Amino acid sequence: MKLLLDTLSTWAVPLLVAGIPLYALTRKVNVYAAFLEGARGGFETGIRIVPPLTAVLVALGMLRASGALDGVARALAPLLDPLGVPASVLPLMVIRPLSGGAALGVVGDVLRSEGPDSYAGRLVSVMCGSTETTFYVLAVYFGAAGITRYRHALPAALLADLAGMTAAVVVVRLLFGG
Amino acid sequence: MGLVWTFLVVAAVATAAFTGSVAALTGAIAESAGKAVTVSIGLVGVLTLWLGLMKVAEEAGLVTQVARLVRPLMRRLFPEVPADHPALGSMVLNLSANLLGLGNAATPFGVRAMQELETLNPRKGVATDAQALFAAMNTASLQLVPATVIALRAGAGSRAPAEILGATLVASACGVVVAVLVSKLLARLRIGDSP
């Protein structure tokens, strides 16, 4: 199973890059012209993402530098410890939706200090793999479409993160023991 | 979003004043702004490549065929999107790329889907129910192969770096289910309709 999935993710991109034009050729598509026509929008879209991403990343960078995130993690620690979330894992829960790079940093720290096959090590792995950098995703997707009012997308996304992390605690305890 | 953003910024400055780290803020502000540009420009390459390939796939009829496979599911999730609308194809491609852990390809597909959904939007700039649901599903990130995490575990000397695959899939499936349920519920309640 693992081998199958590994092979799948290794081969998927090269196969798609070669397979799509090949299939299109058999359908008599003018492959190169179509590619250039579609690709033209790439640069413009990338530039369009700059303003919303700047706004979001600056706010999150400020939060990190101010120590607010560490403060939240410290305040939550006594509440979550009895629920099976060790204090070393908590910073990940706070930072995961905000910064992908910082989240990987926390995962690396826990894997090094407590070992990848410890409870905390498995928990950070599952939490990190099963969630996304919510604020970044929202900034990029909505930014590219020119959306400034997110309506209920933010609460829904954050609740989904919380659900994924809660499920991570439950599943890791069930599968590997606490 | 203006409210959330202002709150985050004000909270950061207030905390910094409290913890005495105001000096660090100035540096963080400039650094983050620079990072936003690096990240966006870094996206240009993959955006260009995959938007080009997607156009090729579209003209060959591949996108419609892929979309047709999961049409019943997509119709239930996004009832307000017309059955033959290009946004459905882009959304299916984005969700499949995410599932396979192909983040590089998933972002361009998702960006394209969001722009196509915007053509259906009567109130430009205000997220529709479909856009909010699609965004929330993306942040929950259902994936079969969390490649980065597995690599980190292997690097840290794990006996079984990939043993977390099943648990990760279950946890992220819970996230997606909650994303869908909460989005549908909040859309019905029309919460967040005012700015």
Image: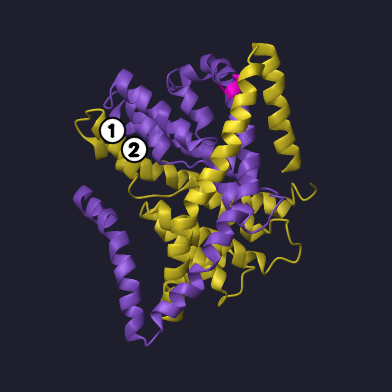
Chain colours: A purple, B yellow
In the depicted view, which residue is nearer to us: B132 or B152? B152
Q: Residue furthest right?
A: B194
Q: Looking at the image, is B126 positioned above or below residue B21?
A: below
- Residue B76, given in percent of the width and then of the height, sits at 56, 65
Q: Quadrant of residue B2?
A: top right
Judged left or right of residue B158, residue B20 is right
Q: CA distance from mark 2 to mark 1?
A: 6 Å
Residue A50: image tag:
none
Amino acid type of the residue tagged 2 in the rendering = Val
Q: Is residue A153 visible?
A: no
* Label 2 residue SS: helix
Q: Quadrant of residue B129?
A: bottom right
Magenta residues (range)? A65-69
* Label 1 residue SS: helix
Within 10 angstroms of label 1, few (less than 14), some, or many (20 or more) residues? many
Within 10 angstroms of label 2, few (less than 14), some, or many (20 or more) residues? many
The structure residue drawn at horizontal position 36% and vertical position 80%, both measured from the top left corner, is A24
The structure residue drawn at horizontal position 52% and vertical position 44%, both measured from the top left corner, is B38
Predominant secondary structure in magenta? helix
- Residue A121, given in percent of the width and then of the height, sits at 33, 26
Residue at mark 1: B153
Residue B149: image tag:
2
Judged left or right of residue A162, residue B172 is left
Q: Looking at the image, is B131 positioned above or below residue B81?
A: above
Amino acid type of the residue tagged 1 in the rendering = Arg
The structure residue drawn at horizontal position 54% and vertical position 60%, both measured from the top left corner, is A43
Residue B174 lies in the magenta-colored region: no
Q: Mark 2 and mark 1 in contact? Answer it, CB < 8 Å.
A: yes
Which subunit holds the residue at mark 1?
B
